[in-house]
Amino acid sequence: MHRHEHHHDQTLAELRDALTAGFWDERYAGTDRVWSGRPNQRLVEQTSDLTPGTALDVACGEGGDAIWLAHQGWQVTAVDVSQVALAKVAAHAEDEGVEDRIRLGFYDALADPRPAGRRTFDLVTVSFLHVPQPDFAEIYRGIAAAVAPGGRLLVTAHHPDDVATGARHDHGPGLMFEPDRVLEALGADQPDGPWVVEVAETPVREQATPDGPLLVRDTVVRLRHN
């Protein structure tokens, strides 16, 4: 899954259609590589202090994050709605010599928001999975359910400020989000909830574009499960 630009006047059905296997299979089949193959900068920053264990990469795309985690010593399960993308992950992992550290799986967020069993992984990471706002809480609760006690959930997303500044086109109404939406959906904004908020911030980074460097803002949330 991962990033895609949408027009503001799209309907909810059209926004949901952009999460389907057919949509992403077609996109991934249309080019050798959609993404850079490099890991998400925020993933690198937010996991450098963690002891490698088991990790779940949700909406893994072509596997840049999963392969980087495997190189760091994590045993990774990478899931996506696109079988074309998963085939690319398998080939990339073999090229990198980490195929024994990566397991692949199918994940359709709209059909079943739970990508894995409950309380299974030391780290669950989901980068740039922008879903329609009516589906947000159910999908992100399903993803969060895979975090083991003492484990972490890491969410990275595009921040809606980027639309206001012109740094990004509007993905569609409500698709981009701030940290508070994650905290509220998971009850992490409650003092007696199941999560400890370790990071909830909106840092700026420089992104390369054909027209030169562009400053963009991310939503970054890292939670530890009690």
Image (tube, grey):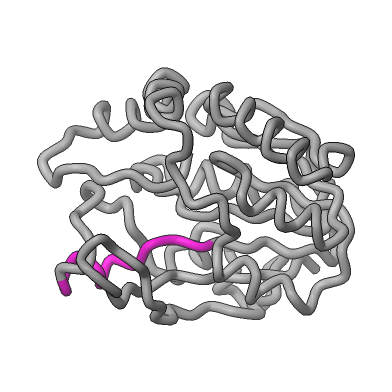
From what the image shows, is residue 206 above or below residue 108?
Answer: below
Classify residue 159 as left or right of residue 106. left
Q: Residue at x 58, y 64 (%)?
A: 187
From what the image shows, is residue 177 above or below residue 199?
Answer: above
Q: Residue at x 28, y 34 (%)?
A: 15
Task: Give the quarter of the image for residue 43.
Answer: bottom right
From what the image shows, is residue 129 above or below residue 88?
Answer: below
Q: Residue furthest left?
A: 9
Report the front residue among 123 and 189.
Answer: 123
x, y percentage for residue 40?
Answer: 55, 62
Classify residue 103 as left or right of residue 9. right
Q: Residue at x 89, y 58 (%)?
A: 53
x, y percentage for residue 162?
Answer: 25, 69
Task: Give the quarter of the image for residue 161.
Answer: bottom left
Q: Residue at x 81, y 73 (%)?
A: 50
Classify residue 193 as left or right of residue 35. right
x, y percentage for residue 121?
Answer: 82, 51
Q: Residue furthest front?
A: 95
Q: Residue furthest top?
A: 22
Report the front residue among 14 and 193.
Answer: 14
Task: Give the quarter of the image for residue 14.
Answer: top left
x, y percentage for residue 75?
Answer: 86, 49
Number of numbered discs on residues: 0
**In magenta segment, residue 173:** no
Q: Quadrant of the C terminus?
A: bottom right
From what the image shows, is residue 68 above or below residue 35?
Answer: below
The residue segment tinted magenta is 156-165
